[in-house]
Each structure stands twice: as structure tokens, then as C-alpha cells.
Image (cartoon, grey):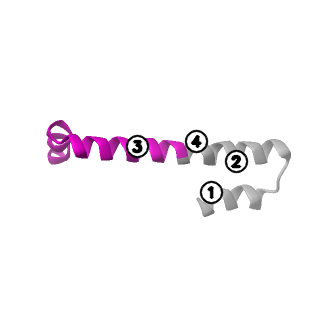
Amino acid sequence: MIRYIVLLRHSRNYRLLFSAGFICMFGLWFSVVGVATLLIELGAPVWAITAVGVVS
């Protein structure tokens, strides 16, 4: 774990890659939550809401 922290502090390229991955995963999570919320509000069946989580 400490090696990753040192790598984040000293390597600009790794910092950029880590930041891009974090932003990408946050966006994916946000879209999955948004679609699931929309399905709940529209009254979709439970299997459809589950399918969103499984496919993602």
C-alpha cells in the first residue's frame, strides 16, 4: 500500500492515470444509480432493476 502512495506522490503519469480511472469509475457508478432510480420511479419490475446492476 505504501508503494502506491509513493508512486502517486512522485509519478505524474501515474497520478494522471489514477485520476482518470477514478473519474471514469465515479461516472459509471453515477449512471448506474441514475438508471436504477429512473426504473424505480417508472415502476419497472424488479428483474429489470437487477439486470441493470448485473450488466454493469
Q: Earlier in the sequence, mark 2 or mark 3?
A: 3
Front residue (pair 39, 27): 27
Q: Is residue 56 above or below residue 10?
A: below
Where is mark 2, residue-wise?
36
Q: Secondary structure at mark 4?
A: helix
The percent position of residue 2, horizontal first and vertical second, equals 15, 44
State how far apart marks 3 and 1 are (Cα).
19 Å
- In three-dimensional space, the C-alpha distance between marks 4 and 3, rounded to whole angstroms, equals 12 Å
Q: Would you say the residues marked 3 and 1 are in contact, meaning their CB atoms lie under 8 Å apart? A: no
Chief secondary structure of the magenta span?
helix
Residue at 70% in and 48% down: 36
Q: Is residue 4 above or below residue 53?
A: above
Mark 2 touches mark 4? (CB < 8 Å): no
Mark 4 and mark 1: span between their CA atoms?
A: 12 Å
Determine the CA span between mark 1 and mark 2: 8 Å
- Disc 2 is placed on an element classified as helix
| Residue at (62% x, 48% y) in the render | 32
Q: Nearer the viewer, mark 2 or mark 4?
A: 4
Magenta range is 1-27
Residue placed under numbered mark 4 in the picture: 30
Q: Which residue is mark 3?
A: 22
Q: Which residue is mark 1?
A: 53
Instruction: Name the residue type under label 1.
Output: Gly
